[in-house]
Image: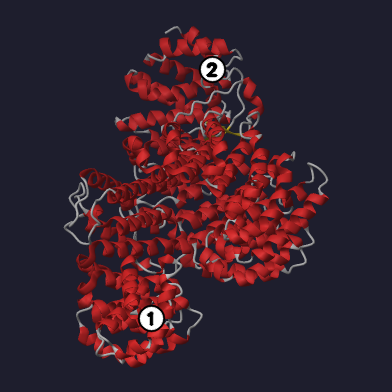
Amino acid sequence: MDEQEFVQLLESLLLPDTERVKSATSTLNNNYYTSPASLNGLLQIICSHPKSELRQLAAVEARKLVAKHWANLPTDQKTALRNQLFQFTLNEEVTLTRHSAARVISAIAAKDFEDGEWADLPGYLLQAATSSTTRHREVGTYIIQTTLESVGDSFPGKVSDLYKLFSSTLQDPESAEVRVNTMLALSRLAMLLDSEADPEQVKLFQSAIPGMVAVLKATIDVGDEDNALQAFEVFQTLLGCDGALLAKHFGDLVKFMIELSATTTVEDDYRSQALAFLMQCVRYKKLKVQGLRIGEELTLKALQIVTELGDLSSEDEDVTPARSALGLLDILASSLPPSQVVIPLLKALGGYFSSENPDYRQAGILALGMCVEGAPDFIATQLHEILPMVLHLLDDPEAKVRGAALNGVARLADDLAEDVAKEHARLIPAMIKNFDLAVNSLKGQDDELNLTIIRGSCHAIDSLIEGLDPEDAAKYVQELVPRFSKLFNYEDFKCKGAAIGAVGSIASAAEKAFLPFFVETMNGLSQYVRIKESQDDLDLRGVVCDSMGKIASAVGPEYFEPYVLPLMEASEEALHLDHPRLRETSYILWSTMAKVYEEKFAKFLPGAVKGLEDCLNQDETGLEVQLGEEASDLAGTDVVVQGRKIKVSAAADGDDSDLNEAAMDEDDWNEEDWNDIGAVTAVAMEKEIAAEVYGDIITHTRREYLPYLESTIANLLELVEHSYEGIRKASLGTLWRTYACLWGMAEGDGMAKWKPGLPLQVEPAEDMMKLGEMVMGATMQTLHDEMDRGVVTDINRDVAATLKLCGPALLIGAKEDGDNIVEDLAAQLLSIITKLHPCQQDLGDEPDEEGILDESSEYDWLVIETAMEVLTCLSVALGPSFAPLWKVFEKPIMKYASSQESTERSAAVGTIAECVGNMGEACTPHTTTLLKLLLHRLSDEDPETKSNAVYGIGLLCEKTANEAEILKALPTIFTKLEPLLDAQDQARLLDNTAGCVSRLISKHPDKIPISEVLPRLVQLLPLREDYEENKPIFSMIVKLYQANEPTVQQLTPNLMAVFEKVLGEPEDQLEDETRSQLVELVQHLRK
């Protein structure tokens, strides 16, 4: 090997000459790096060349070649090289070069340990790590942590010796680097540790944690930012490791981080890091956080930190403690039960809202806004107290408080659309007042405060108006559209976008009442459909496209026809403008147009299907980033490259081959990290939207889509295993919608209606069976180990809805491992209902029946509630053959029926009632147990639970063959039903009471005092809410007329008035069969 040329080629890589760099790279790769001698040459350069930048580059290159060539070097040469490299690294003064050389040692050690060589390295490292020379200790601990990273469990010697060493180096008196290296090494051991296999090592690790906290604290105290950030990262890493490691000190660690985040004398960066750690704790260890009952303390501390926010500028996106605290509140509300977050927050808000300090008033409403999404059901029950305070803040003397209140209204309306919309008559005038005031006070483009109010008013009205009925929304069209239209040509892009978005939502809510403004609005917006000169242009174009889609759904296909083609053409062009958000907007537009035009959307299908397929085929891994001099102004910023957000490093001179790599510490350059850049990329989010849009297009174009269906299903099945939960959810959702759509088409083509039970009594076509098998197979595979509760919740909803619509055909076909699908599905549902499913565990923990907590956050409860829905729909699909499954589920469901939480009792009692109704007579063996529980719940304080219990009693009496038990209980039943008749404000309860009594009369006409009961029952008619109960009621009345029962004859004048009402509007009061029975009865009575 020509050593002189070799060195010259390496030196060429450092020159600011792109052509010479390319030429040198090519020569090195083709002529030198193919030979083991090149590795020897590079190692010699590391150890002896006078230029540190060349030594650094040689180390980077050598590390890549170790795996390829180290084994092929002569044994004696390897021995000399090991010693030479180790001695050089110990004494190298330049940190970057020292670290790169250490990583070469780790790479060599990884190969050597595999081959049983370099047995004396651990001894050398121990010697270095305990040397009296600080530099040697730094190098020794650094090589240990990088070698542990490379070799994992293969590190020679006893692991207890490492812990013994680390207990000393963690307290190094002179070097923070030694202490932090030790923490990093411990985190590498943590990743490998299995508490069940090695409980002794767990104890050793736990004993190190107080020392690790002390290291972090010391770096913060002296303002050592680099080491502090690495120490924080170690604690973040531990949250993802075996749960036993932090278990002993978890509470203390969380409290330390809470105090740190709340201490205003500490630098903001450290406080934000502490808050980030707390967010991860709540996200990944929520059961432990909940068990410690520190949710309230976290909530109130976060609320206090939000008061530091100052002026809320939409332009300023820096991470600050106040912004991080808002993020923490968001996660707290969705992860912990209301008793630990939302209830203490609401108690504290009164003082914040009435504070003289505007920072407190602003913090209060922003904090409330952040918590709505996590606990919408609970906050809905408190709106009567919250909204008057919000209205007061909308009239606050401080503009920034009004801006925050507008933000609060938008967030409340996003998650509680119908509830908040009931107050439209007070809220919308208050928002218009804010809008007008800001517009009239605006002092130009730099008046950020007034611009924030204008945008905030638009966003708040945008969110609120979509919850209104068309008649209510229509009242505001005349008032709002002319106001917002004036901003269509305003200079500020964000104001313009907010106004355009709001007008789209007003149209969507007001429907035909928007028509007087339709043409003028479309003319105003058309100028933006093709703009593409700048990023702002493309952002605005996306908003316009969204808004036009909403307008199309409001005015309908005929009025919108002149605009369809240009808009569709613009949406297809948008796919090629390298703007992920704009591409998503195009897909959503296609979904809207498919809903508006249905089968007539067929002419656009070729373009839409190709666009969606291209989206799903995008590569998410190829990330070759080459940045030269011309990109130097991007240094230190985030850019989106191939849909991923990437931090740009400053380009080194002549950047081409390995220069970016050589210019950074290899600690920052880790291939796994690079592959993990933001697990959720822009491309992944785009694919999520595309997968959802397929569902809308397929279900609305129906037969027109059939030519494309096979390839679409294949594409979606591939996505079911994607690493991003949003894509798994969307692709499975669309597969289920597709199955249901095809089933509906088959029934429309004459396929017989399915019948409950297995084996199947109605066989669907073979292709339907095959699709069902594929979709069910993909779903079950996902369900088994899915850790995201949102995905599991959606799977539950999809399976429940499809079982109800399409019956038991889905449950046919053996799974690959031979298990019966019904048994497998039941096992998964049982694990969810008993809180033992993977999505209900903390990261790194195994299910633990003893550690199950009674309370749940609203989203955690939703997983269980939707599992109960699947159970109910299984009973619909299986009918009497569901009975063996009920034996498995009876106990856990009944446990929820006695819960402290009314929502849990209500859901459980409703599930019991539905399952009884669907099992029919097969419920008989459970009569005694269920009757006792349902009778008890007839006195429940919660109207929903009580109503479900009444419904359940009626069904149990109707279906069971154990008549003796029912007859014995009749006096008790009527005693408990009697007081319910006074609840005139609870329509559903009264409707279910009427249904229950009707079932009792039908089943036991000779045992019920009809002359007393029937007049009271007729007073409850017509039903006001639960129209399903009309079936048993009118079926019973028809039977009484057929039997010439005297009481019913006397009530005929009253009943004729009832019949007239139920045979009229709304039509959905009666099923077809009941309607025809009634029509016949009325005709008979009129004769």
Q: Is mark 2 on a helix, strand or loop?
A: loop
Q: Can residue 133 be seen in this view?
A: no
Residue 1014 x, y percent position in the rendering = 36, 87
Q: Nearer the viewer, residue 910 or 151?
A: 910
Q: Nearer the viewer, residue 477 or 943?
A: 477
Q: Distance between the residues labelled 2 and 1?
A: 95 Å
Q: Which quadrant does the N terminus fall into?
A: top left
Question: Nearer the N terminus, badge 2 or badge 1?
Answer: 2
Left or right, residue 4 beside residue 1013: right
The residue beneath circle 2 is 49
Q: Is residue 503 above or below residue 493?
A: below
Circle on res. 176: none
Q: Which of 30 and 537 is in front in this view?
A: 537
Residue 514 x, y percent position in the rendering = 62, 51
Q: Can residue 533 be seen in this view?
A: yes
- Of badges 2 and 1, the one in the foreground is 1
Q: Which quadrant does the C terminus fall into?
A: bottom left
Q: Is mark 1 on a helix, strand or loop?
A: helix
- Residue pictured at 37% horizontal, 85% vertical: 1052
Left or right, residue 552 beside residue 537: left
**Disc 2, disc 1: CB below 8 Å?**
no
For badge 1, the amino acid type reads Ala
Q: Which of the 4 quarters of the picture holds residue 298?
A: bottom right
The residue beneath circle 1 is 994
Residue 979 x, y percent position in the rendering = 43, 89
Q: Which of 440 and 679 is in front in this view?
A: 440
Residue 800 x, y percent position in the rendering = 34, 58
Q: Which of the 4 quarters of the picture holds residue 837?
A: bottom left
